[in-house]
Amino acid sequence: MFWKTLLDALIDTLIDTLKIAPFLFLIYLLMEYIENKAEDATNRLMSKSGKVGPIVGSIFGVIPQCGFSAACSSLYAGRVITMGTLIAALLSTSDEMLPILITEQVEFLTIIKIIGAKMAIGLIAGFIVDIVLSLTKKNKQEIAIHELCEREGCQCEEGILKSALRHFLHIIVYIFIFTLVLNIAIAFIGEENLASLFINLPVIGALISGLVGLIPNCASSIVITNLYINNIITPGVMMSGLLVGSGVGLLVLFRTNKPLKQNLIITAILYGFGVGFGVLIDLFKIVF
């Protein structure tokens, strides 16, 4: 019985992964093309955004992949954008959420609601931070965004097709491993019992999800998005993790920005807004 359950879980995982693989690759190919063509223009727009920076940051933050959050962290380290703009971009960053929602054929309206919520929360939080801190421009320093992106494994200059294939293989392995673990857990524990761990402890669930979101790579958004798709976590718990999750954005921030205390404060602000809004979403029973 034990080995049969494992075999069934493995077969289900292979089928699920193979079903989404072709579409997922096409999505990454398209995103690599867009990112390659629009990155310089986006960075210029961000650097000239001024007081409306949180608006620009929250809008462009929904573009998947690590490039934008890494770029914003670098721009902030050079004091080209405000802390509020950085917070707005990090909160709205979708990382791997959007490709997974699309490939899992989640309803289009649901995807729009989730993206819209992340943008709105990022915008609100960004303006709050800028107003409270009243940041003033300091000496700028030259930041090599492409070098930072490559240092963190993005390899943006390797060509659209090769980069898309590398990213696709990287993500599909994550998806396969997590899906397999999730299928095994559901088989042995039961979906209802697994979901009750989060549903019965909504605030704790949001706190835990936010901590998962702090993992500085695509794994966090993959895990959280899949848990939500499988109805194991609530919309608020899901949103907590996805708001805090910003790909390699925080990693680049800690590598480029000084002092360390400021980076810790930014991380705390990001976590506080993410978890706070997640708790409010569940409190008011908002659904997507």
Image (cartoon, helix red, strand yellow):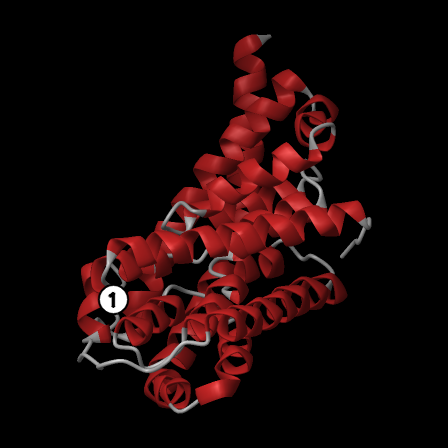
The x and y percentages for residue 135 are 41, 76
Residue nearest the observer in this picture, 144 or 14: 144
The x and y percentages for residue 77 are 27, 71
The x and y percentages for residue 165 are 33, 62
Q: Secondary structure at mark 1?
A: helix
Mark 1 crowdedness (10 Å alpha carbons): few <14, some 14-19, many ≥20: many
Residue at 78 percent of width and 46 percent of height = 283
> Looking at the rendering, which quadrant does residue 79 occupy?
bottom left
Q: Is 23 drawn above or below residue 18 in the view shown? A: below
- Is residue 242 visible to us here? no
- The residue pinned by badge 1 equals 149
Q: Is 228 drawn above or below residue 107 in the view shown? A: above
Relative horizontal placement of residue 258, taking residue 199 as reference (left or right): left
Residue nearest the observer in this picture, 163 or 279: 279
- Is residue 287 visible to us here? yes
**Quadrant containing the C terminus in the rendered view:** bottom right
**Quadrant containing the N terminus in the rendered view:** top right
Q: Is 103 drawn above or below residue 211 in the view shown? A: below
Residue at 55 percent of width and 48 percent of height = 241
Residue nearest the observer in this picture, 210 or 189: 210
Disc 1 marks a residue whose amino acid type is Cys
Residue at 37 percent of width and 64 percent of height = 66
Relative horizontal placement of residue 237, taking residue 269 as reference (left or right): right
> Looking at the rendering, which quadrant does residue 155 occupy?
bottom left
Residue at 46 percent of width and 64 percent of height = 90
